[in-house]
Image: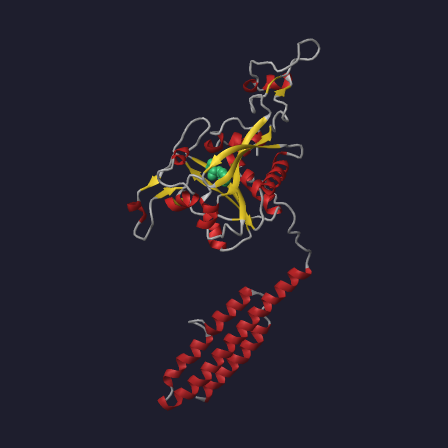
Amino acid sequence: MADLIGQLQSLAATARGAVAGAADERAIEELRVRFLGKKGELSAVLRGMGALPAGERPRVGEVANRVRDEVEALLGAARARLEERKLEAELAGPPIDVTLPGRRLVPRGHRHPLTRAADEITAIFSRLGYEVASGPEIELDWYNFEALNIPADHPARDMQDTFYVEEGTLGPGPRRGGVLLRTHTSPVQIRTMKRLGKPPVRVVCPGRVYRSDYDQTHSPMFHQVEGLCVDEGITFADLKGTLAAFARAFFGPATRTRFRPSYFPFTEPSAEVDVSCSICGGKGTLPRVRAQGRPDEAGPERAGGSGGLHPPDVRCGTCKGTGWLEVLGAGMVHPRVLENGGIDPARCTGFAFGMGVERMAMLKYGIDDLRLFFENDLRFLEQF
Ligand code: PHE
């Protein structure tokens, strides 16, 4: 017995020396195999236990366990020491410049022009103190129409050709009325008022909307940005000032705005808002040179000039010679809509507006065909 214990003790002593001298990961691993491995020195000593009388085995086993624990601890400490030394060496070495650009130039993606336009629109309103809100694209008839003062038999429903959803496809659950793909972002007005519960409400809501149209200027899916501002004492003057500031920020500082009377069931009074044409600067005409490069814009009507030294101007195709572009629907929130949103119309007033993102992007970036947005042709997309 004493013999085996002596062997174990000398094994421990050798291990202490050897591990202290181990210079790297590999040396440590070799020592682990040498001392603790299946065919290692500890196993060899333990094999000698078979020859001992049964009464002496526990004592030797105890020492063997202690030696194994000690060697394991030594190896662990040695690994930790190495790690630490490596880290210190890295920190002491030449610094790595993490700001250097990569060597391989990977082409970077970028935002789709519609995303970019919607981001610019919401950024302008967030500078005016608006928050961004959103709502579901699969919407209840109540939010899309009913709560916005458009009852089932109202002729205004014809303004928006709607995709209805068969409720059976939606799974179980309580619902009031029909389910549809929202035809505008205006249902977010009601949802936001109900969520906030009290004024002030100042939100813009970008999002996808759906209508059953499809031609050169209509896509069954398109994008809108809704705006809603409700508080005590909000007036039509606030609406005008806000939209004029927005138009200048989006289309440029010289942009003028014009309000024409219109009708929406959820606003009263309502207006269509025009901005001065971003292409011809509101003149309605373009210099001949420019128009020649873009034959679509050169209508046959000549707006001015008589030949001679200066080539005559031609009609601006974007605003059809009027100098104005219709870009927005807007108005003062109808009292019934405030009520449906849980806000007291006797105490608060508000305004709302809605705009089409495709149209805003086309006017800002000079894009003449709506379908370009959805064809995903890289030659088009890479220009933005
Ligand atoms: N929801 C209207 C539409 O899609 C636009 C609008 C929004 C008009 C808010 C007035 C106020 O045509």
Q: Quadrant of residue 85?
A: bottom right
Q: Residue at coordinates 60% horizontally, 18% vertically from top-left?
A: 291
Q: What is the x, y in percent for residue 137?
A: 42, 44
Does 52 sit left or right of 236 as displayed?
left
- The residue at 28%/46% (across/down) is 168
Above or below — where is 23 with respect to 155?
below
Query: In this view of the protein, can residue 110 be seen by the observer?
Result: no
Tell me the quadrant of the picture where the N terminus can be found.
Answer: bottom left
Residue 314 versus residue 123 in the image, above or below: above
Q: Is residue 164 visible to the viewer in this orientation of the structure?
A: yes
Percent of width and height locating residue 214? 41, 29
Q: Quadrant of residue 90?
A: bottom right
Image vertical order of residue 196 relative to residue 372, above or below: below
Residue 186 percent coordinates (x, y): 46, 43
- The one nearer the camera, 302 or 346, is 346
Residue 93, position in %: x, y? 68, 58
